Amino acid sequence: MDNTDTAFDDLTSVLTDPEAIRELHERDREMFPKADKPQPPEKIVNWLAMLRLLKGVPFHYLVSDPRMLPPESIRFFYVDAHWLEHLEAGAWSVGKVSKTEQAHDRVFAPQVRSEARALAETMLSQTLGLPVDFDTASSESIPETGFLLRSAALPYWPGLEVKACDGNGELIQRVRLDLLANTVMIGVFEGRIQTLEFSQPAETLHFGLNVNESTKFEKDLRNQDGQPHGKKIDVPLREGGNRVLKVASLAATMKQEVNVDPFTSAEYALQMVACVEQVRFNSPKSKSA
C-alpha cells in the first residue's frame, strides 16, 4: 500500500467519524476565534420550520385517500407530535446516503433542528401573541388540533372568517388558515377544537329577506330591543317581476305590526338589517390525542 492509499484511508476515517469532525471544527474556532460561527442555510431552517406548521407537506400525506375527505365534508384532526418527528426525520433523510453524510448529519443536525424549532416557536408566538412551548419531544405537550374542509362554497365566500372554541367555550388562537386548493381549506389551532364557526366578514352586514316555501319574500319582525317579535309579514313587490320592493308600503306594514310611532328610517333599518351567514360545526369529543 503506497502513501496515497494510506492518506485516503486516513481522510476517510476522519470524514466518517462524528467525533473527529466535531474536533476539527472546534480546532477551527480555536485558531480563528474572531471568525463567524458557521450557520445552517436560512432556506433549510425556514423549510423545516414550515413543515412543523404543516406547510409544504404534500396533500396525500395529510389525506392518504380521497374518500377520507369527500366533497362537502369537514374532518377534524390532531397534530401528533411523534408524526411531526418522523416527518422531520424524513426531511433529514434526503442526501444522507454515504457514511460521510451520516457522520456530518450527527454533528450538525442538532443545531439545525434546534434553530428550525426555535423559528417555528417564534412564528407561533407572533401569531398567538404568547410565549409558546414547541417542545414536541415531550409526550405531555398540549396537542394542537385542526380541520380540513372541502366545499364548493369556498370560492364564493372570499375572506371567510373562522373561529374555534374549546370545551369551555373559550376562544382558541389560530395558528394557520390556508386554502390548499379552490375548494379545500386547512386550519390549525393552538388548543383542542370543540366548536368551529365559519362566517362571512362582518362588513357584509346588509338588509335581507327570507324566502318561504312558496318562494315568496317575507320578513321576521323585531321588537325595539332587537329581540324577535314573533310575527312575519309578506313583502310587497312592484309589478314587472324585477323584484323591486315597495318600500313605503313595507314600512307602513311594519309600523302597524310593531306599533311604533314615529317609525323613522332607524326603525326601518332595525327591521331590515340581517346578520352575516354563519355555519357552526361541533367536533367529536375524544379522551386523548
Image (spheres, rainbow, N blue to C red):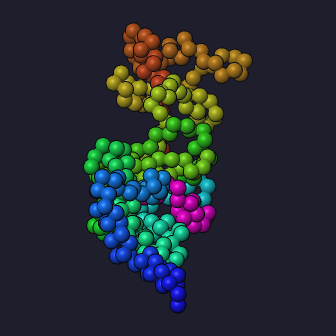
Q: Is residue 35 above or below residue 99?
A: above
Residue 245: x %, y % from top left:
60, 18
Q: Is residue 80 visible?
A: no
| Residue lying at 47% horizontally and 67% vertically, measured from the top left | 92
Q: Nearer the viewer, residue 67 or 179?
A: 179
- Residue at x 52%, y 77% (from the top left corner): 98
Q: Tell me where residue 196 appears, x and y as whole percent.
A: 42, 49
Residue 271 at x, y percent in the picture = 45, 22
Q: Quick one: 81 or 186, which is closer to the camera?
A: 81
Magenta segment boundaries in residue numbering: 50-68
Indicate yes or no whether the magenta region holds residue 25: no
The residue positioned farthest toward the bottom in the image shown: 1
- The relative height of residue 144 versus residue 90 in the rendered view (above or below) is above
Residue 72 in view, yes or no: yes
Residue 60 on the magenta span = yes
Q: Position of residue 168 (x, y in %)?
A: 28, 52
Q: Determine which quarter of the picture holds residue 66.
A: bottom right
Identify the image quadrant of residue 225: top left
* Residue that appears at 47% across and 33% down: 201
Q: Where's the C terminus, which quadrant?
A: bottom left
Q: Nearer the viewer, residue 248 or 276?
A: 276
Horizontal side of 235 relative to 167 (left or right) equals: right
- The foreground one among 228 and 53 is 53
Q: Residue furthest right?
A: 240
